[in-house]
Image: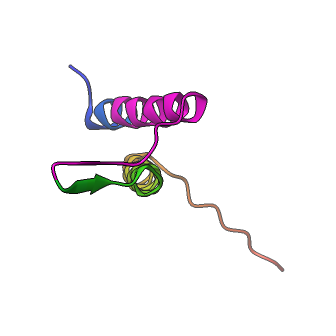
Amino acid sequence: MPTVADNLNATIAGYAAALAADSVNPQPSYELDGKRVDRNQWREGLQKLIDALQKTVNAQAPYIVSTKMVL
């Protein structure tokens, strides 16, 4: 059974793939039934979501605190 971190990493990978695909073949902004879709805002929003998910993954990962004492 996948862990929470595995699920988050899979989600991040999917979003990153969507951004990569959009950078290869960028889609224009458009309006449909009175609703406007701005692709630049979509890209920025997706990148912010990836960043937030990555912070969550990092927070769940084990970490080591290292200190040094100067004499």
Horizontal arrangement in the rendering, residue 5 relative to residue 17 (left or right): left
Horizontal arrangement in the rendering, residue 64 relative to residue 27 (left or right): right
Q: Position of residue 44 (x, y in %)?
A: 46, 56
Q: Position of residue 36 (x, y in %)?
A: 28, 55
Q: How many marks?
A: 0
**Residue furthest out toward the top:** 1
- Residue 60 magenta: no
Q: Is residue 19 above or below residue 32?
A: above
- Name the image colouring: rainbow
Q: Position of residue 48 (x, y in %)?
A: 43, 57
Horizontal arrangement in the rendering, residue 69 relative to residue 31 (left or right): right
- Residue 27 magenta: yes
Q: At x 46% / y 49%, what residue is drawn?
A: 43
Residue 69 or 48: which is nearer the viewer? Answer: 48
Residue 20 or 38: which is nearer the viewer? Answer: 38
Q: State which region is magenta.
A: 10-33
Q: Main secondary structure of the magenta part?
A: helix
Q: At x 21% / y 55%, what residue is drawn?
A: 35
**Residue furthest out toward the bottom:** 71
Q: At x 34% / y 34%, what residue is drawn?
A: 11
Residue 62 or 12: which is nearer the viewer? Answer: 12
Q: Is residue 5 above or below residue 32?
A: above
Residue 24 or 58: which is nearer the viewer? Answer: 24
Classify the position of the C terminus by image quarter: bottom right
Q: At x 46% / y 42%, what residue is drawn?
A: 28
Classify the position of the N terminus by image quarter: top left
Q: Is residue 13 above or below residue 44?
A: above
**Residue furthest out toward the left:** 33
